[in-house]
Amino acid sequence: MRLADREQDGVIVLEPKGKIMGGPDATLLHDKLHEIIEAGKKKVVIDLSKVDWMNSTGLGILISSYSTLRKSDGELKLANVTEKIQSLLTITKLVTVFDAHDSVEEAISSFK
Amino acid sequence: MNSEFIKIIAFTLTGGFLVFLAITIVRDNLVNRLNRITGAMLFFAGLGPLFMAMGMIVSQSPEASVGFKNSTLYNLQYVWELFFPFLLLFSWIFPENRLMGFRYSRLRNLIFLPVILHLFLLLFYRQISGLLGSLKVDANSEGFSRIILIPVERLFSLILFAIGSVRTYHTIIFELLNVLFILTAVYFLESSRRLVTNPRLLTQTRVVFKGIRIGLGIYLVSVIGPLFFQQFFTDAVTSILLVIASATGVGIFAYATIRYQFLDVRLHFRQSFVYTITSALLVGVYILLVLQSKKLLQPLFGAQTEIVSYSLIILILLCFQPINNAIDSFLRSIFIRTRTDHRSVIERFSRQVISLFDPQKLRQIIEETLKTSLLVERVYFILYDDEIEEYAVLLSDDFPRRLPLNRDDLLLRGINMLDSPTYLHSLTDYMENSKLAGVLQERGVRLILPMKDANHMLGFLALTGKVAGYRYSADDFNLLGVLSNQMVTALTNARLYVDSLERARLQEEVSMARQIQLDLLPSSPPTLETANISVHSTPSRTVGGDFFDFIRIDDQRIGIVIADASGKGMPAALMIAQIQAIIHSEVNNGNRISTMFNNMNQLIAEATSPEKYVTIFYGELDVTCGELAYCNGGHNYPVLARADGKVELLKTGGPLVGALPHMEYTSTSIRLNPDDILFMFTDGLSEAMDKDEHEFGEERIREMVSTNRSNSAQEIMDCILNDVRMYDPTYPPRDDTTIISLKLNDMLVPHE
């Protein structure tokens, strides 16, 4: 997994690419989130359009990110959830937990 | 050859050796005060016998000896008495430097005063007595001269008398003074010897002190003896004793220097010393032989003496080379045996550490090598500590307290950039606010020896100065460089070995965990009158995250569990064990299914981090009437294929369990009928992939269950497993796979 990040309207947009599999991916995302929190930012959107697959550890990373942000009064939203990940979120019933949007813009505007 | 001649030879030889040894020691290290003082001491000790020999040579010719005893040259021989103050000075700085920190250290030069006075007296006595005696006052004079000069004249004559008596008895007075010097020096030597801890230095002092004691003891006997046994201590006896005394001195000092690195004299200096002396002796013997050959051969060969003598000389010269070689190899073997040669140090060290895997033992050997071969006073290890993931100072192996260092410590960073042994004082740029610098300086560390492999620094050694104030030489730096490479290899080996032990231990742990998990899983599905149950389970690693269970709740109801913990291996297995315990205790307490899930979620979420979770489906089947109460905690939907071909998915429940606290779970009840099939699985089945990475998918599973619904539970499962094996040639899969296939039969009595 590679991780790009940018800031748009005061919201940090993270764009992971490839498979989210755990191991180094977890550390990468974890460190990035802590960086963001330390910089005082609290609104984060993870753009999943370029993530083709996610295993159970990958899902764990998403949950962990969500929980980390919540603990520091932040909020995590998902954007461009692919069909496969959507079905994963549905089965695990995490759709009730994660706020998922069809586009990054929609996710950003939902913060307001 | 008379006895006088032998005495001259003996005096010259011992005196010459002492002077030569003195020069060797000073030449090796002119900067070091200990070398200079020892050199001066031995030099003046050598002057004694040399002057004595010279005196004997001169007095052999009767014309020259007249008046010789009063000549300046003769009196100069007392210069050798400077030996005694230098001996005292030596006792102050070896083996411990006691002068360091002494405020009035210049006062030490006062100890030379007696000898200088003695010389002054002997050399200028005539001038002094002439000067003092020249003042003669007329007894009848009046006024000024009577009042002032007469007391002065009295005083002068008194001084003259005093000096005269000293002059007359100077030998005995100054010999007693020398005895005083000796006793004081021996006292200091003995008391500072108790402070020595380094084993090599201890040997040095033992040998050197023995030499000093024997030499001085014999000297004392030759000085004090004549006072009481005048008849026995003739001149001949005294001179023999003096020869023995100085020969013992030179012998032992040379032995300590060559064999035990006394004064840390470099190997080639020590070698050249021995070679020079042996070759001088050899050549001397040769010259003697050649000179005397004619005289020895004369009675045997008469007229032919000339020819025989020449051929003998040629023969002897031919033998010179082999004899020289024999001596050479003999000496070489001595030096190799002393084990102070750097090559042998390295060889011995690598032989010792090559098969050593105990890090503590390894450190001991490194420390011992540095202390005995390089005479380092103390050694500190600063090594990367895997447990705390920081560098730490190991203060002592006897007392295993370690001093952790911050990885941002400035000095640590500075040392990280080093490649070779470096003096600590050249790193002052890195010392500000450095805890490490404080620790090292406090302990008198002088030298840093970094230990690096290709990628990173394992740590470094901090060495204090050498014993007795010896200095590190360029040779030492080379040796340290080579040794540090060897240490890196040895330490890495030791660490790898410990790691491999650790791995073996972990492997054992994993296989134990697997056994525990196998014991936890039911060995076979329960046999029921109203339903057939088939189970398939393949953990993808030694210990998997999948889990299933059947729990007899009462005569009517049976609990069915299928679950998949996130991750694999040990952590997953541990969580499974925890889940199983929770379910069993909740069932025993008779809690409702939704309460069980709420409790389970809360317990796991609190005990583990968010990425540790479990998807779990739990159902309670009433085996008499077919009622199924269930809750699905984020698990793949179990497929319920009705006998009429309709497919239902069991979705009711809540999110996956254990990730986030305060989740709400609900349960529901459905009615199962005869010939209905309940097919439960984990994502190992649905996520099996073909070569293009397309998933097998849940849709396909539903269709296959429905299509094959007329078959038995086992047949349906086998059919799907065959299909997935064709779909994914790599099956058994990357993930664990667990399947529970359940089919109800006609024995079921549906409640109306």
Image (cartoon, helix red, strand yellow):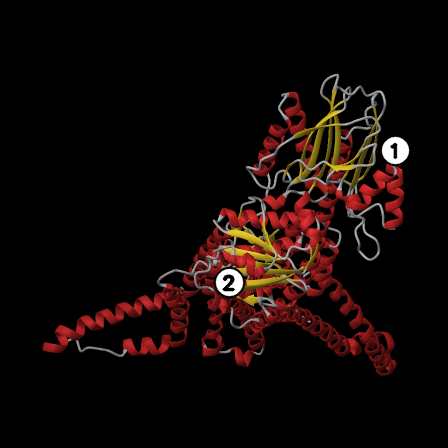
The residue shown at (68%, 69%) is B271
Q: Is residue B495 above or below residue B544?
A: below
Q: Chain of mark 2?
A: B
- In terms of depth relative to the viewer, which is nearer, B613 or B169? B613
Q: Are marks 2 and 1 on the same chain?
A: yes
- Can residue B407 be seen at all in this image of the molecule? no
Label 1 SS: helix
Q: Residues within 10 Å of mark 2 (few under 14, many from 20)?
A: many
- The residue nearer to you, when weighing B673 against A69, is B673
Q: Nearer the viewer, mark 2 or mark 1?
A: 1
Residue shown at 40%/60% (left/top)?
Answer: B101
Element type at mark 2: helix
Q: Is residue B267 left or right of residue B470?
A: right
In-image side of B195 versus A24 (left or right): left
Q: Quadrant of the N terminus of chain B?
A: bottom right
Is B145 placed left or right of B642 in the picture?
Answer: left
Q: Position of residue B736 (x, y in %)?
A: 78, 42
The percent coordinates of residue B570 (x first, y second) are: 70, 40
Q: Is residue B588 above or below residue A93?
A: above
Q: What residue is disc 1 on? A: B714
**Labels in figure, total:** 2
Give the alpha-carbon distance from disc 2 to disc 1, as whole Å: 70 Å
Using the image, determine if residue B470 lies above or below residue B50. above
User: Subunit of mark 1?
Assistant: B
Three-letter residue code for mark 1: Gln
Residue B411's disc is 2
Between B273 and B194, the one lying in front of the other is B194
Identity of the amino acid at label 2?
A: Leu
